Amino acid sequence: MSSRRRSWGLLTLVVSGIVVGGALATNAATPAKTPTKTSSAAPRAIVSGGPPPPLLKLADVRPGMVGQALTVFQGTKPEPFKIRVVAVLKQFLPKEDVILIRAEDPRVEHSGIVAGMSGSPVYIDGKLMGAIAYAWSFAKDPLGGVTPIESMLAERSRPRRRSPEDVGVATAEPDEPRALPALAAATNDGEPHLVRASVPLAVSGFTARTIAELTDELRPTGLVPTQAGGGRRLDATTTSEPGHVEPGSAIGVELVRGDMSMVGTGTVTYVDGATVLAFGHPMFGIGEVYLPIVDAEIHAFLPSLAQSFKLSSPLHEIGTLVQDRQTCIIGALDAHTTMMPVDVRVTGPEGKTRTFHADVARNRRLTPMLASAVVANAVSQAEPDVTDVVATIAARLDVHGRGTLALDDQTFSTEGLSGRVVGGARGMRALSELMFNPFEPVAIDRLDVDIRFQLKRDAAEIIGVALPREEVRAGETVPVRVTLRPYAGGEYVETVPVKIPLEVAGQSVRIEVASGVTVRPDMAPAETLSGLIDNMKKYYTAANIVVSVQRPDEGAALRGRLLQDLPASAMDTLRPGTQSRRADAYRATERTVFASKRLVTGHQEVTVAVRDDALGAHK
């Protein structure tokens, strides 16, 4: 099979330079290297070249035209390669045409249009025609699709609702769905398609298990995590050095940095002052967004029958991604945005603590997923064994302006500390719930997670519950016997003293016994952010046996508060038929919490008759 028979991956590239008389030249006779104007806190970037090149309108593009494209084959310097226009594909996207080209260069003939080449600028007679953005999957020839530069430049006129400096503080954001939008990516059905290929997401510092879980999470977006390079050091030397930007140079969108790195790398298409256009297609397709952008070094092209891609490493922060649109991404070199610090400490049975630090991108849809990946990866590196494990997960979320939210979990797993187990922890769920709360904007200043684990199966299942007799009295404290069965051990009984409510005299009541992790405390639905945070602090854990006795009296949940023991007349007042906003009725439950000597699972219940004479009273 030919080495070009592959799923042609399309990557974003940003390129600079002009083709003059069919030959590649820089934008000025003597390329100037001028630092962009930035604020004192903004990253620096050196931009090569003079004014932007002239443009070739789509209406003037004809089949057979010959020109050049720019991309980095190795290192940081863009190099030209020959292309030929094949056709113009009308309405390839809604209201968008695509120019079909063929690469005619031995290097590209061998590798094809590789992932990471998206955004590579294409010039005809010194005029910028557009950016390579699409490719044929499973094609024998290196065919690609070019997004016209006119479509990309049109995105610059979009007004922005926020500034990069607002990211990380509690400012209003438009409503967003929780899930990232699905984008068309290369398929593996063996049939040729002209598609927006997957953006190579270069990751380093992540284990194979975490990468597999990330791949599933990111599949709808077309991003494919690949161990295709290294991260960047975060020290005074590297962060103070200026980056480099020019058409055709490598550019990346940084999602994670620190002990772990995650960067979507492509190419620069167009530079005008502090504005950079790249990719020729979206990264996520989520519109206005603020993420750090970096320059990058290309180590090599890695040809593959399935997916050719560039091996790369990020170098310096150079600005901020501000728009993620259908035809391109747009970066601002004079802007700076922040990331959310995540610190993870993992302590094993030998008492040794391993510490991990990473910064993750601030975005309502991305941050929870990225933070979970960082925590899961730290655990996977510290304890990769897929075996029985008992763990305590203590999460601390510093909520901007509202103090620290502390949430603890005790968990048992037979599959080790997998990403699924860690991602299901109360602290990780709270991160997502806070960022998508319906009340007001929230910023999380940082996330700290302490995990302590033992390699053992120290858990027991609730398999039975019994009372000392068939009838009890209201007001009486009854010893409820809970039978538990541990793994590879004998059954044992815990006795939980439970008081029978006076209100159930003369009735039959159901007594439920369950692991605390499956029981939700009585609470009114939150109607403010403060109420939501308060509700998050109310929970039971797997180390609790919770006994619940339902009371007959009716209560109401009204405007974030629980009102108990209400008479029928009060309920009628709280639920008038002439208003849509009424109190919600609920049945109050009496709960007894018992601390178990090991984690518990399971649920059992029993029904008992309550005599109509209360304890100590006469008939």
Image (cartoon, grey):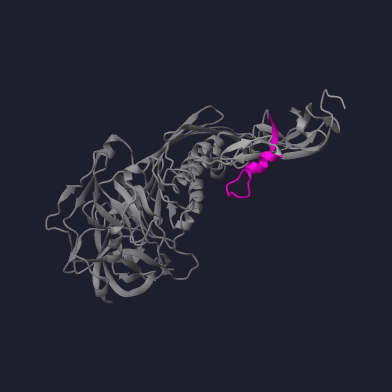
Residue lying at 15% horizontally and 54% vertically, measured from the top left: 31
Q: Nearer the viewer, residue 384 or 261?
A: 261
Q: Is residue 218 above or below residue 492?
A: below
The residue lying at 35 percent from left, 74 percent from top is 90
**Residue nearer the viewer, 46 or 490:** 46
Please state which of residues 354 and 521 is positioned toward the viewer in this rendering: 521
Residue lying furthest left in this view?
A: 29
> Within the image, what quadrant is residue 339 found in?
top left
Q: Which residues are magenta?
A: 568-593
Residue furthest to the top:
616
- Quick check: 154 above or below 604? below
At x 31%, y 71%, the residue is 101
Where is residue 148? Give x, y as percent.
Answer: 29, 67
- Location of residue 258 by image quarter: top left
Pick the quarter of the image with the N terminus.
Answer: bottom left
Check the picture and name the quadrant holding the C terminus.
top right
Residue 343 shows up from this direction: no
